[in-house]
Amino acid sequence: MFIRILCLLLVLCAILRADNPALDAWLKRQATIETLETSFTQERKLPSLKQPVTTPGKLSFAKPGRVRWQLGEPADTLALSDGATLTLIDVAAKTARQVPADSPQAARFSLLTGKGFQSPEAFHTMFEVVEHRVQSAIHQYTLKARDRRVRSQVPWVFLDIDPAKNELRVMELELQDKSRIRTLFHHSRFNLKLAPALFTADLTGLTVK
């Protein structure tokens, strides 16, 4: 009986892995994208709040590893990565915190632009696809990071992919405190020339922790 159950699980895993053409097509496209600039709307759901907090933002990235994540317009929070260091800036408090760009603490900002989304092979090495369903022609994936360190910071990742445009529509993260950050992307532009200064943190007048 145990062997039968094990074989059934292996078959189900193989089917789940194979039946992801929309995901694999989107991942293959990522190899052709050198830069991205997009606006987004972010919803943060907290266990202590009845209604989510909604904030506009902007995301820019350039390979390899440069990221600018701006929340608020004008900016309330900035996350800037030069590929080696991620700098988190609280504009109102005039404080900054720096962590290695490849650290688990940086995962929520660098996950989308990291190595795991650069090819189908890299993706399946980094993530396990726990669930895949289609709703209104949008492919929805529930992911779990294989790395325990990343999973300790971001237990669950949810992607909504539009196969008609071959674009990521929504990314949602569930954090270790059970809060959720849902990011809806819109007006994405690819392979523009982005100035290096866009990803450089100006620490003038800030207290660096």
Image (tube, rainbow, N blue to C red):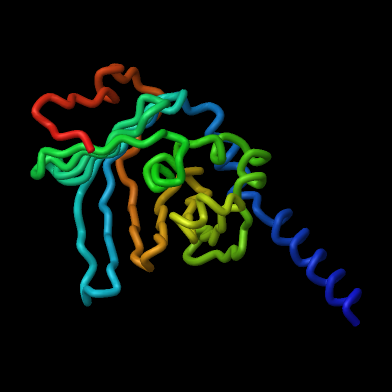
**Residue 29 in sight from this viewpoint:** yes
- Horizontal side of 173 relative to 123 (left or right) equals left
The image shows residue 78 at horizontal and vertical percentages of 23, 38
Residue displayed at 70% across by 61% down = 16
Quarter-of-image position of residue 37: top left
Residue displayed at 26% across by 52% down = 41
- Horizontal side of 108 relative to 19 (left or right) equals left
Quadrant of the snapshot with the N terminus: bottom right
- Horizontal side of 24 relative to 66 (left or right) equals right
Quadrant of the snapshot with the C terminus: top left
**Residue 60 in sight from this viewpoint:** no
* Towards the viewer: 86 or 196: 86
Instruction: From this view, report whether residue 113 is shown above or below residue 8.
Output: above
- Number of on-image labels: 0
Residue displayed at 31% across by 45% down = 186
Residue displayed at 55% across by 64% down = 134
- Horizontal side of 143 relative to 35 (left or right) equals right
Question: Residue at the front extreme?
Answer: 209
The image shows residue 99 at horizontal and vertical percentages of 36, 36
The image shows residue 19 at horizontal and vertical percentages of 70, 57
The image shows residue 30 at horizontal and vertical percentages of 53, 34
